[in-house]
Amino acid sequence: MAGKIQEKMEVIGADGVHVGTVDRVEGDRIKLTKRDSGEGSHRGHHHTVPMSLVAEIEGDTVRLSANADVAVTFEEEERGA
């Protein structure tokens, strides 16, 4: 499934809420663009979401198996990236 995920695809939770935009896939994680990095101390850092949360790919959208508010708890922050 990772091979189907392309740059600039929207990542949404199972609830249809925007989680981020794909920058690229790195190993078993989807790296989100910096502009979707949030506010405060999270601003300007890439975040990644595990591929294990991907439920399906619909056109230009990556749908996760978890709702957006739960999916962000699985995010990892990459400083200096």
Image (cartoon, rainbow, N blue to C red):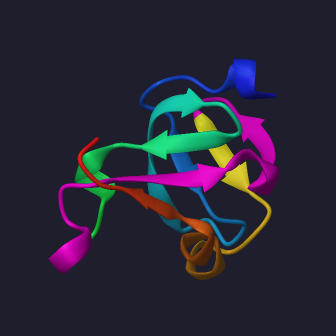
Quarter holding the N terminus is top right
Query: Could you tell me residue 16's position as x and y percent?
Result: 61, 65
**Up-down relation of residue 16 to residue 5 (above or below):** below
Q: Where, by quadrant of the figure, is residue 73 drawn?
A: bottom right
**Is residue 39 in view from this perspective?**
no
Q: Nearer the viewer, residue 59 or 25?
A: 25
- In the displayed structure, 76 sits above or below 80; it is below
The quadrant holding residue 71 is bottom right
**The one of 23 and 27 positioned closer to us in this rendering:** 27
For the view shown, which residue lies furthest in the front direction? 80
How many numbered tags mark residues here? 0
- Across and down, in percent, residue 63 comes to 70, 51
Q: Magenta stretch containing residue 47, yes or no?
A: yes
Query: Is 76 placed left or right of 42 in the picture?
Result: right
Q: Which residues are magenta?
A: 40-60
The quadrant holding residue 2 is: top right
* Residue at image point 72% right, 18% down: 3
Tell me: residue 51, above or below residue 40: above
Left or right of 78, for residue 44: left
User: Looking at the image, which residue is at 62% across and 69% down?
Assistant: 74
Residue 73 among those drawn in magenta:
no
Residue 18 screen position, x and y as percent: 48, 62
Residue 36 at x, y percent in the picture: 31, 56
Residue pictured at 23% horizontal, 47% vertical: 80
In the image, farthest residue toward the top: 3
Which quadrant is the C terminus positioned in? top left
Task: Let me know if residue 38 appears in the view.
Answer: yes
Left or right of 34 on screen, residue 64 = right
Q: Residue at x 58, y 41 (%)?
A: 30
Left or right relative to 2: residue 11: left
